[in-house]
């Protein structure tokens, strides 16, 4: 999931891991609410979960938030 995600998906994941709502996430990332909802629902499908709580629980088992932030910064610098 993470390897096939683009920078915006990774940023959404990072925001969710830090407790941001969909509305806060779209505001911080300058994305529309429908975009955040669509992208997150697609990630939920890929991960095989039904909601944000299940998604975060799954992601936190495998992803260190600090490493994710570092990875996002590196990807952003490449663009």
Image (spheres, grey):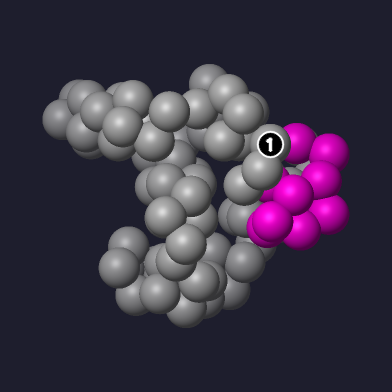
The x, y position of residue 30, in whole percent, is 31, 68
Q: Quadrant of the C terminus?
A: top left
Picture residue at 68% right of the left edge, 58% below the top: 52
Q: Is residue 52 one of those drawn in magenta?
A: yes
Whether the magenta-drawn stretch holds residue 12 is answered as no
Q: Residues within 10 Å of mark 1 (few under 14, many from 20)?
A: some
Residue 75 can be seen in this image = no
Q: Quadrant of residue 4?
A: top right
* Residue 10, x across and y down, in percent: 44, 40
Determine whether 8 is above or below 25 in the image.
above
Question: Which residues are the magenta region?
Answer: 47-55
Above or below residue 58? Residue 19 is: below
The answer to whether 66 appears left or right of 35 in the picture is left
Q: Is residue 48 above or below residue 64?
A: below
Q: Residue at x 50, y 56 (%)?
A: 16
Examine the rendering and report whether any part of residue 52 can be seen. Answer: yes
The percent coordinates of residue 65 (x first, y second) are 39, 36
- The residue closer to the viewer here, 57 or 42, is 57
Location of the N terminus (image quadrant): top right
Q: Is 17 left or right of 56, judged from the image as shown?
A: left
According to the image, label 1 marks what residue?
58
Q: Residue at x 76, y 58 (%)?
A: 51
Residue 48 occupies quadrant:
top right
Q: Is residue 28 above or below residue 72?
A: below
Instruction: Tell me if 13 is positioned left or right of 39 in this view.
Output: left
Question: What secondary structure is found at the residue carrying circle 1?
Answer: helix
């Amino acid at each position: 999931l993470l390897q096939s995600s683009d920078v915006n998906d990774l940023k959404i994941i990072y925001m969710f891991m830090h407790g941001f709502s969909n509305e806060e996430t779209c505001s911080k990332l300058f994305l529309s609410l429908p975009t955040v909802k669509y992208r997150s629902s697609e990630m939920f499908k890929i991960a095989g979960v039904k909601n944000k709580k299940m998604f975060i629980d799954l992601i936190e088992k495998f992803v260190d938030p600090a490493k994710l932030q570092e990875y996002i910064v590196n990807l952003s610098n490449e663009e």
